[in-house]
Image (cartoon, rainbow, N blue to C red):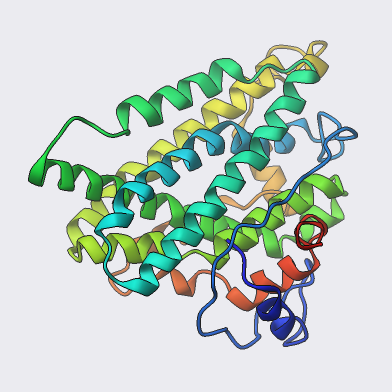
Amino acid sequence: MTASMESAGSTESAGSTGPSGNSAHADEPDHLVLQARNVQFDWANLPMHWVPGDPFSSHVFNVLHLLLPAGEEWFVETFKEALPLIEDEQLREDVIGFIGQEAMHAKAHTGVLVHLKEKGLDPTPFTDQMEWTFNKILGQRPLTGGRARNHLIERLALVAAIEHITAFLGDWVLNADGLDRAGVHPTMLDLLRWHGAEEVEHRSVAYNVMRYFDKREFRRVRTQIIVTPMIVWLWARGTRYLMRNDPELTNWAPHRRKPHWSDFYAAGKRGVLPTGRELVVRMSSYFVPSYHPSNEGSTAQAVQYLASSPAARAAVR
């Protein structure tokens, strides 16, 4: 999940820095040893609408907390199943680091869910559905032989498709100076950028694992065709759930409590959310035959942010 502190220090001064203190043009490190950072976040002072005056954007981001704990725990279990079948030592090392990072991501986002529930917004009905989806529909099945292997590879391909999305979103959040201009709560901003930086840092692992088991293009493209509309649907559904159940919006008219495309468009213009065009361009890059995740974002930039992240620095201390 993280690079060693030696690696972080070696890239910190290279290149010019962006809004998050990062370096998009620094020389890329050859290879990082991925490690899990034991970060902790204090949510005691986090307001419900931590993008000031913007419940919609706050809840669009909060959908991450609804989806990721169950999803990333599923990533971990899927990769644990694949690990004994991988003979390439460097890839095995990357997978072990990936597992540690994803487990920590799930834990960090679960802390936000606890905070939301304490403030009167119970996420349990939605998160229970997510756990059922990942465990029952996408989990292990009592299969043997070639069918069991194919089911595993299919799930690895799904993880790779999802990791493409998390990688470009991680790159976006590292460079989103609109979040700084909007005055986003610093603890949440650090969570988003810490997680985004680690997604950029390990962005090639799931893809490389999928290609290790299946180098054909058909499965890679087909799984992204499945994943893309499913993610969009879940995100819209999650935003509707949060807006509808937000106790601080009870005085709003029912129409205002429903998310609208105009809200998304306005947030994109302010730089608080990605624009629709950005999402389409970044999402569709996965379908290009020459695609490789290493072209999504900068490892040096990610490591440089992780060297300055309050939560990551506290974990090292």
Q: Is residue 298 above or below residue 109?
A: below
Q: Outermost residue toward the left?
A: 146
Residue shown at the point (72%, 74%) measured from the top left: 304
* Left or right of 225 in this view: 61: right
Give 89 or 300, whichever is nearer the viewer. Answer: 89
Give me the residue at 86% from left, 55% from top.
Answer: 181
User: Which of the pair 85/63 is nearer the observer?
Assistant: 85
Q: Is residue 317 visible?
A: yes
Q: Which residue sits at x=66%, y=86%?
A: 26
Which of 89 and 26 lies nearest the eye of the viewer? 89
Q: Residue 16 placed where, x, y %?
A: 76, 84
Q: Quadrant of residue 256?
A: top right
Expressed as whole percent of the image width and height from the top left, the position of residue 286 reads 37, 62
Relative to 220, does residue 108 appear above or below in the rendering? above
Q: Quadrant of the N terminus?
A: bottom right
Q: Residue 65's x, y, as percent?
A: 62, 35
Q: Position of residue 3 (x, y in %)?
A: 62, 71
Q: From this viewpoint, which residue is outermost toward the right?
A: 45
Q: Is residue 169 left or right of residue 250?
A: left
Disc tally is 0
Query: Is the C terminus in the top left, top right, bottom left or bottom right quadrant?
Result: bottom right
Do we see residue 280 in this rendering? no
